[in-house]
Amino acid sequence: MMRDWSLDLFFPTVARLPTTLPWRWAARRGRGESAAERKQLLQWLAGLFARVFPQASADQRAQWARAHLAMLAEEMVDAMAFHRLGQPGGPAVTVQGVEVARSLLRQGQGFILVLNHYDRLLTAPVALAREGIPTNVLTMPVLDNPDLAAAQSRFLLRKIRGYTGVTGGKWHTTSEGLRPVHESLRAGQGWVILADAWRPEFGRLRGHAFLGGQLNLPTGIERLAQSTGVPLLHAATYSRQPDRLDVVVEALSGTPRECVDQVIQRLEKDVQARPWAWWHWGLWDQMWQPSADLERAEEGHS
């Protein structure tokens, strides 16, 4: 629903405006949807929240829906202005747990920084870069992704250039092969990977208890950590205002599988506390399924 002009012109232009006005403006304006499209999106989100969080009031669900669209728009400004995050005139960023990553860097120890599609997610690696901790990032394909329109690809390429310019690392995609990632981790570099990345063609999925059912996620992170022997860290961003962000970095303990379990348990708690901040509601029916117990209970009431 995003217009080409929003991707090619509006967000890149607005992101250059002084002060934190771009983020506050985006929170009110959205991503370029028409009024009718926005109304439809808000109704759909509120309906989904009613299914997942039946105890919430209608007003609460409507508020979450509005906050969700605002957060996605704010992140689009981030994408064109990574260099302004945590800098004078840009959103203020506080970071807890920097020493966890700094200690690994001093030891020459590679690591995987695990993120989720939650809130302003790439703020964490940008904040670490400000502290002298560069990271690379591994994502799904961009240029050879058939689901992306031309304007979306152009926007993402600008985002990649801005992001790597700030973080000091490489942007690598799964379609390019993982050998460079293995070698880089063993050589002591850090890599950012998202645990809740999802595509319908993904294989090797594993279920995680999540909001009364099961969230099916790829096992790539745990397999990569197992084969390279590197530790895993987790980071999450919590936006308090469009221009005020808190980042929390923490070490994970146990086997790679156990570490990923901890990450998804944290995601579940975060989503329960702030449902609007998770990106993947549009994929809910593909990623999530009811547990066997829940299915049996539903059958008993039908």
Image (cartoon, grey):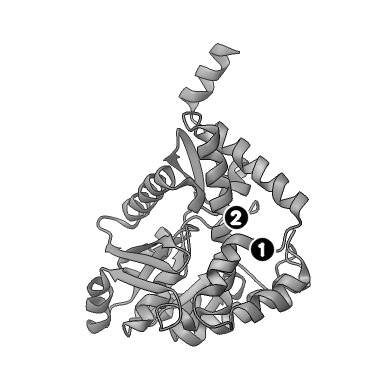
Q: Are marks 1 and 2 in contact (CB under 8 Å)?
A: yes
Where is residue 125 shown, x and y percent of the image? 41, 74
Where is residue 246 shown, x and y percent of the image? 35, 65
> Label 2 crowding class (10 Å Cα cut-off): few <14, some 14-19, many 20+?
many
Q: Which kind of residue does numbered mark 2 sit on?
A: Leu
Q: Nearer the viewer, residue 69 or 176?
A: 69
Q: Is residue 143 visible?
A: no
For the N terminus, the image quarter is bottom right
Mark 1 lies on residue:
31
> Label 1 crowding class (10 Å Cα cut-off): few <14, some 14-19, many 20+?
many
Q: Residue at x 71, y 63 (%)?
A: 32
Look at the numbered disc 2 and give the secondary structure of its residue.
helix
- Up the image or down, 95 lies above or below 147; here it is below
Q: Which kind of residue does numbered mark 1 sit on?
A: Arg
- Up the image or down, 239 lies above or below 15; here it is above
Q: Is residue 242 visible?
A: yes
Q: Residue at x 66, y 81 (%)?
A: 13
Mark 2 lies on residue:
69
Look at the numbered disc 1 and give the secondary structure of its residue.
loop
Distance between mark 1 and mark 2 Cα atoms: 8 Å
